[in-house]
Amino acid sequence: MKLNLSWQDRMVFVAAAAGCETKMDAKAPIGQGSALTPKELVLAGLGGCTAMDVIALMRKHKQKVTRFDVKVDASVSQGGHPVVFTAATLTFELDGEVDPSVALEAVKLSQTKYCGVSTMLSKAFPIRWELVVNGTSAGQGQAEFG
């Protein structure tokens, strides 16, 4: 896997890989806040990786998902540099004709076996998760990879 990073202006960079591009920027006053920051992109990678696992498993089990959101909330260190993530919480929200036990198994498999980004990041800080199906809590846990 390779990626090229090109400086555009001020604190704006463009990351390019496999024919796709993503812009990033810093928050004001250093940057202009015109794009996600590098740390926000790490969280996007975490949420995106596990979301793809879960939706693939839901499709495999023929679940009729009408809405699926993953909310990622990370805590950061205080009082100095570097500022790093100290914990993260993933909230999986699914609506539709969904069996909560199937959704729970999909999230558990993602957070214990399949999600490579969760695997890497869980070595640096705890990742907790909660599953909500049709507005009702259906389970919670923590990323644990063998």
Image (spheres, rainbow, N blue to C red):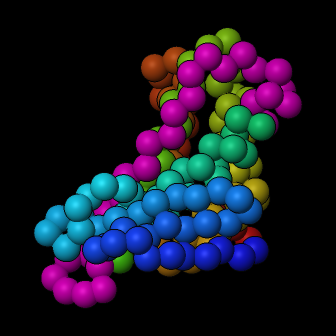
Question: Is 61 displayed left or right of 50 in the figure?
Answer: right
Query: In percent of the image, x 76 and y 59: which residue is there?
Result: 113
Farthest right residue? 60
**How many numbered discs sit on the rendered protein?**
0
Pick the quarter of the image with the N terminus. Answer: bottom right
Left or right? Give the position of 97 relative to 137: right
Q: Is residue 6 above or below residue 36?
A: below
| Residue ID at (65%, 74%) | 3
Q: Position of residue 132 (x, y in %)?
A: 50, 29
Left-right relation of 36 to 67: left
Against 65, residue 46 (above or below) is: below
Q: Quadrant of residue 53?
A: top right
Q: Residue at x 54, y 76 (%)?
A: 5
| Residue drawn at x 71%, y 35% as measured from the top left | 55
**Range covered by the magenta-colored residues:** 57-83
Where is residue 76? Give x, y as percent. 30, 69
Considering the image in quadrants, where does the C terminus appear? bottom right
User: Based on the displayed image, in which of its 4 quarters is residue 29 positioned?
Assistant: bottom left
Which percent across, then down, holds residue 133? Answer: 55, 24
Is residue 61 covered in magenta? Answer: yes
Q: Where is 61 relative to 91, above or below?
A: above
Q: Residue furthest front?
A: 9
Q: Nearer the viewer, residue 115 or 131?
A: 115
| Residue 47 in sight | yes
Residue at the far top in the pictured view: 97
Residue 39 in view here: no
User: Which residue is most to the bottom?
Assistant: 81
Verify whether residue 27 appears in magenta. Answer: no
**Nearer to the camera, 118 or 36:** 36
